[in-house]
Image: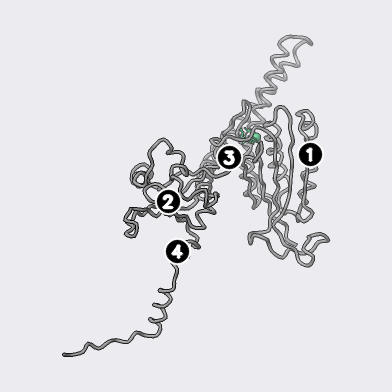
Amino acid sequence: MPVKAQIPESSSQIKLKKIQERLNYKSVIQNMNTCVIITDERRIIYLNDAAIKTLGYSRRSLVGKDLTSLFPVYEKKSFTISDFLAIRDKTMPRNELDFVTKDKRVMPIGFTVTPFYDSKTKSSASIIIFRDLTEIKKMENYMRQTDRLAILSQITAGLAHEIKNPLAGIKISAQVLEEGMKEGDPSCQLTARIVKEIDRIDNLLKRFFNFAKPSEPHFADYNIEAVIDGLYLLLAHQFKNSKVSFEKDFSKRAPRVFVDENQIEQVLMNVFLNAIQAMPEGGIISVRADTNVIYEKDGKGLDGSRIMGTMDGGVPVVYVEIKDTGSGISMENLEKIFTPFFSTKKEGTGLGLSICRQLMLKNNGDIDIKNNEGRGAVVVITLPAALN
Ligand SMILES: Nc1ncnc2c1ncn2[C@@H]1O[C@H](COP(=O)(O)OP(=O)(O)OP(=O)(O)O)[C@@H](O)[C@H]1O
Ligand SMILES: [Mg+2]
């Protein structure tokens, strides 16, 4: 009988086999960056580290829990993995669900579900792989707003120009009429009203114009604390009248910033006014500034030591946080507030924050707003550090 010749395994194949035998797949899943949840029909039986980190709850509080408790939007339904699959196939083409985090933030989650039969326990189970879509959604939202802004800019620039000229004519005519009237003539009140309302429209048009065509920034180095101090002096009267007190905590490590001072002042002014308006009964505005930069030598950034890098690996920036003790912003409105013309105020144009974002991006920075943990809102402005 002929003996089949055995092809000897190469040494690299043997090595690979040994590694495969030794490889602990559970530890691979446990440590990978992708978020993984394994469930039986409806309960969570396993979560890897990335899933725990993203969801923000402890492993103990999630294992054994019903999936329904993770996605309360579907609370009323009897929720099983087949529902999950149904959602995927029918109502949610992009496989998305909202998750409510521990700090009550709605986190959009993108997921895929792979059902499998576990022959060991003789039961069906599912692997859910998911990711936090917050940043992607934010970017999508921002892109939509920028599109709207671009169209709006073109329309408003033309329109503002067309309205301004006849308006100036009406204002002058009203003033001439007023001059011809005798003192105490009741019609004076009417002409004064005409002039006042025209000034209001004129003011609105100026904002439109500014919004439609913001000037190019003139960059220079500024001490942001000095800029805020100057602005506070300008608004001191308003702060006092509105019973709002002002607190300041600036890190000595914060470097100077490289921006257009006027434009940043305009942003801060809008933010301060919003904060004051959110506190009709008075309150506190606290401004804090810090930085991510690392300095050479003593690392303190005093005496002009050079910036060597950043703690988070990003570009060197200064963060300015403006916190108020006002009404805060409802979850529903939070994603709309940077949309042009969105306002909850009777007299608001709803352009304040969209102008702020536009100016911040022109200045290589950013602006974001969220609710403060205790009460009120907190605006975070990111400014590029001036490099020495
Ligand atoms: N600090 C804050 N606290 C609570 N709500 C805020 C705060 N800042 C902004 N908002 C909300 O965001 C909305 C949009 O603000 P934005 O500055 O763009 O417009 P506005 O203040 O309404 O009008 P305008 O700035 O033209 O006077 C506001 O109407 C308000 O509902
Ligand atoms: Mg405003």
- x then y, percent, for residue 88: 36, 47
Q: Earlier in the sequence, mark 2 or mark 3?
A: 2
Can you identify the residue that label 3 sits on?
A: 338
Can you identify the residue that label 4 sits on?
A: 26
Q: Nearer the viewer, mark 3 or mark 4?
A: 4
Quadrant of the drawing holding the C terminus: bottom right
Quadrant of the drawing holding the N terminus: bottom left
SS class, disc 3: loop
Q: CA distance from mark 3 to mark 4?
A: 44 Å
Closer-to-camera residue (322/354):
322
Q: Nearer the viewer, mark 4 or mark 2?
A: 4
Residue at 62% across / 28% down in the picture? 345
- x then y, percent, for residue 370: 61, 42
In this view of the protein, can residue 289 be seen by the observer?
Answer: yes
Q: Mark 4 is on which residue type?
A: Lys
- x then y, percent, for residue 329: 60, 35
Q: Place residue 191 in its image quadrant.
A: top right
Q: Place residue 239 in its image quadrant.
A: top right
Q: Earlier in the sequence, mark 1 or mark 4?
A: 4
Q: Earlier in the sequence, mark 4 or mark 2?
A: 4
Q: Mark 1 is on which residue type?
A: Tyr
The residue lying furthest to the front in this view is: 121
Q: CA distance from mark 4 to mark 2?
A: 21 Å
Is the shortest distance between ligand 1 and the CB of mark 3 under 8 Å? yes
Mark 2 is surrounded, within 10 Å at the Cα level, by few (under 14), some (14 to 19) or many (20 or more) other residues, namely some
Q: Which mark is residue 232?
A: 1
Decide if residue 59 is on the left or right side of residue 320: left
Q: CA distance from mark 3 to mark 1?
A: 24 Å
Q: Which mark is residue 205?
A: none
Decide if residue 171 is on the left or right side of residue 239: left
Residue at 77% across / 46% down in the picture? 249
